[in-house]
Image (tube, helix red, strand yellow):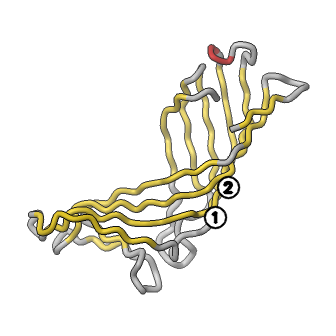
Amino acid sequence: MFDFPFKTNPHMSMAFGPGISSDNIQFKKTYVGIKDQTATLRFTDQSDTTHFKKTKLSTAYFEAPIEFRYTANPFDSDHSFKFAIGVKVGALIAAHTRNKDLEGENGGVINPYVMKEISKRFFNTTRLSGQARVGWGHFSVYGSYQITALIKDGLGPVVRPYAVGLTLSGL
């Protein structure tokens, strides 16, 4: 991201920059029907029948984040308290599932292979997320929350992903 300090107050700045992000949701013994010809996206529990051991639902977005930043000591930011709050606007690039290791109902592997399915039909093509970071020097704690639903209205459950974690950066 490109940081633009305010001329009137060097403690504050705005940051902009394009980026690509991807999110993964893990499932066990669950079928995610992103290519099914159904009216809604279905998440089917298959623990009592033939199923894939693991399923991963992945989405990728092209994003444009905007942040408002505060640095307590802008002349020595490597040893200073920092805070940032902002939003990200994104456009969906891809959505797919990756299913691994077909198993029987007792858990034994029937066929060790990987099946991938690609479809954006059930997913919102734009997303809006809020984000915040707070830290000292190059280390910070971050949080983000997707304001728009991951799945289109009426086509599945209302899912709004969130993330919390640690960051090593130059904030």
Residue drawn at (50%, 63%), measured in percent from left and top? 159
Q: Is residue 151 left or right of residue 16?
A: left
Looking at the rendering, in which quadrant would you find the C terminus? top right
Q: Quadrant of residue 135?
A: top right
Residue 89 is tagged as 2
Circle 2 SS class:
strand
- Give how far apart the Cα atoms at labels 2 and 1 are: 7 Å
Tell me: residue 91, above or below residue 74: below
How many numbered discs sit on the rendered protein? 2
Residue drawn at (67%, 29%), measured in percent from left and top? 83
Residue 126 is tagged as 1
Sequence-wise first label, 2 or 1: 2
Crowding at mark 2 (Cα within 10 Å: few <14, some 14-19, many 20+): some
Amino acid under disc 2? Val
Circle 1 SS class:
strand
CB within 8 Å, label 2 to label 1: yes
Residue 69 is tagged as none
Tell me: residue 87, above or below residue 79: below
Residue 27 image point, x, y percent:
32, 60
Residue 61 image point, x, y percent:
57, 57
Residue drawn at (61%, 56%), measured in percent from left and top? 62
Residue 122 image point, x, y percent:
51, 75
